[in-house]
Image: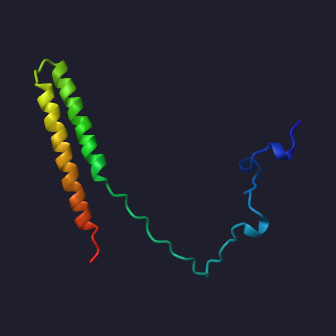
Amino acid sequence: MSTHDDVPDSVSGSTGLPESAAPESTAPDSAAPVEPAPQRARLRVSTVVWGLVVAAIGILVLATASGVSFDLGLVMIGLIGFAGIALLIGSIASGIRNRHP
């Protein structure tokens, strides 16, 4: 045998708010406050750079598996150097763009 207390709020129709705090319906003639449009999420430079690094490593693994020969130590040094330079340039560009006069 179950009681009303055993039923979750979403099933029983209760919002969990006191009746005085329940949202009131607005009349069509009243002006509802206009909420600003949500801002578009910006791409983070670090996310893009590390995504490119992981993609490059994946391509190197596939190329090595298909028989292409690389000096993997030199390739990894170059890849990490590229990532470092890209992160520095990206952070400088982001700092310049976000600077307020």
The residue under the point 15% across, 35% down is: 77
The residue under the point 13% across, 17% down is: 67
Residue 91 higher or lower than 50, as above or below = below
Which part of the image, by quadrant, shows the N terminus? top right
Q: Nearer the viewer, residue 43 or 97?
A: 97
Residue 38, image x, y percentages: 43, 65
The residue under the point 25% across, 61% down is: 94
Quarter of the image where one finds residue 72: top left
Which part of the image, by quadrant, shows the C terminus? bottom left
Residue 2, image x, y percentages: 86, 39
72 to the left or right of 9: left
Residue 81 higher or lower than 66, as above or below = below
Residue 42 higher or lower than 62, as above or below = below
Residue 27 higher or lower than 97, as above or below = below
Q: Nearer the viewer, residue 80 or 69?
A: 80
Quarter of the image where one finds residue 32: bottom right
Residue 5, image x, y percentages: 83, 46
